[in-house]
Amino acid sequence: MHSLDASARDAIRRHQSALLAYFTYRVVNVEDAADLCSETALVAWRRRRTMPTPDDEAKRWLYGVARNILLNHRRAARRRSKLVEVLRTELKRADTIAVAESSDGAQHEVRAALESLPAPQSELLKLIHWDGLTIADAAAVLGLNASTVRSRYAVAKAAVEAELSASEDEAFLDNRHHGIHLVD
């Protein structure tokens, strides 16, 4: 092993717990601190040729790397937060539209029927009917052959139709039962 590699490895090991503490005090989740510390070690190792060799300078250099990683982490968190807000607003709007379009409760029955399917079938139907993808597009997203997706789509669609039909039959029987009044 090259002496520069050994020096960098030793510096990273020597200051690893201090860097973990640095992140722990600055992030909300401890898991994030561990990830950021690992990322710092990885970046430091990749840039080990620029790491100063005196230990006190190496420590400052590692803290500089850690600070940049923390800043990137915070920027990414802000972007995710903004995206979550945009998505939350969009989902509320879409859900409001869906409820308005389906005031008889059919929307809830469709969701329940989809959720009763195995996850791959449910996802396939959602990609086609909710996201507006073609069978070929859904096949590409799922990494499957289009003919395979076409046959799986037919099976999933038939299963949902059967589930919805069963729900309608149960609703009919429930309504008929509630119409009967027994007299004591």
Image (cartoon, grey):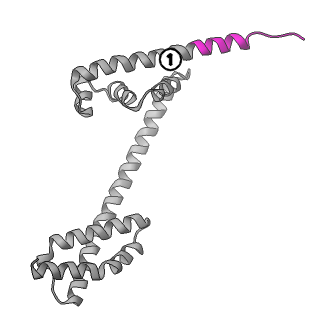
Place residue 34 in its image quadrant: bottom left
Residue 27 lies left or right of residue 100; in this view the side is left
Coordinates of residue 134 in the picture (x, y in percent): 26, 23
Coordinates of residue 127 in the picture (x, y in percent): 33, 29
- Residue 90 highlighted magenta (yes or no): no
Q: Residue at x 25, y 22 (%)?
A: 148
Q: Is 165 drawn above or below residue 129 in the view shown?
A: above
Could you tell me what secondary structure mostly forms the magenta stretch?
A: helix
Residue lying at the far front of the rendered structure: 1
Q: Tag 1: residue type?
A: Leu
Callout 1 crowding tier (Cα within 10 Å): few <14, some 14–19, many ≥20 = some
Residue lying at the far right of the rendered structure: 184
Quadrant containing the C terminus in the rendered view: top right
- Residue 181 highlighted magenta (yes or no): yes
Mark 1 residue element? helix
Q: Is 24 drawn above or below residue 90 in the view shown?
A: below
Coordinates of residue 33 in the picture (x, y in percent): 37, 68
Provide the residue span drawn in magenta.
169-184
Residue 173 lies left or right of residue 98; in this view the side is right
